[in-house]
Amino acid sequence: MLDTVISIEAFGPYASEAIDKAFDRIADIEKKMAVNAESSELIELNRKAGKELCKVSPDTFFVIKKGLQYSRLSEGKFDITVGPLVKLWGIGTDKAHVPTPTEIKKALSLIDYTQVKLDESQNAVFLKKAGMALDLGGIAKGYAADESVKVLMQSGVESGLIDLGGNLYAIGTKPDGTPWKIGLQDPFDVRGSIFAMVEVADKTLVTSGPYERYFEENGKKYHHILDTNTGFPIENGLMSVTIISDSSIDADALSTVVFSMGLSDGIKFVNGQKNIEAVFVTSDYKVYTSSGTNKYNFKVTNKRFKIESSIK
């Protein structure tokens, strides 16, 4: 679901039923917010761009509102109106290709989070320009993780681990009372290979990086994290950013926001936020961390990687 593989592990007397309910909740969210489906609330909203106000469910309205908050916070580096550009590149589909400068210019003209109008009184959204399109791919998985945690905890689960294709949420501690040991994905290796470990309880971890989805054309790799200024994939020397936080919807958006800021601005930004930490990996195998990462017993486990004490 949500274009990824999802696994849920839970402990407690009603854990099995709770897991079923959590999957049902994730399926419900996907049905509302999918952009690559035959129909969804989001597809209907995008279809009405420039024409009329579109009522959506409280779920979709909440995620759009949160997405606009992060679009403002990042001054458009993260922008939920990126839909036309995402569709144009087609990364992750069999239509992936490098667009022409004319196509990119046209798509960029439709990306502007300030052109989204919200009507709180009736959970309605209006996209002011025809051709605009929202894409919640950078935030919907985080919301689904938070919501599935709620479902599990309401069913009495006090210990569990949710993995939405790299969006992780550790509920409580492990059943034996020790923290969950989470491996951070090695961005240079196959999925499941790790370069570092952290220990967490009641925390979420979300990683963004160019290694997740990409295609090659004429010997060059093009990844899915797109620069809303140039229209091309971001190239800033970062290979991954992992955010550790209390809320998965925040961590999901922030992993993209911080990645797009680059190493220096990204670390400064994270150090200025409360209850958020980050781990950065650069293309030369160097690892940088925000100021409070040590409280999670952060350790690099792969000798190819070197921890840097400061940004040069």
Image (cartoon, rainbow, N blue to C red):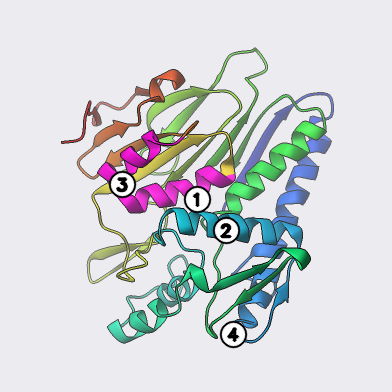
Q: Which amino acid does the dot numbered 3 rest on?
A: Met
Q: Are marks 3 and 4 in contact (CB under 8 Å)?
A: no
**Residue that mark 2 sits on:** 3
Alpha carbon separation for disc pair 1 and 3: 17 Å
Mark number displayed over residue 239: 3
What amino acid type should be assigned to the residue bearing mark 1?
Ala
Badge 2 density bin: few <14, some 14–19, many ≥20, Cα 10 Å: few
Based on the displayed image, in which of its 4 quarters is residue 30 positioned? Answer: bottom right
Q: Residue at x 28, y 33 (%)?
A: 287
Q: Is 188 or 28 nearer to us in this picture?
A: 28
The disc at residue 253 is: 1
Q: Is residue 210 visible?
A: no
Residue position marked by numbered label 4 in the rendering: 50
Which amino acid lies under the numbered mark 2 shown in the image of this protein? Asp
Q: Earlier in the sequence, mark 2 or mark 4?
A: 2
Q: Residue at x 45, y 70 (%)?
A: 86
Residue 285 vs 58, above or below: the answer is above
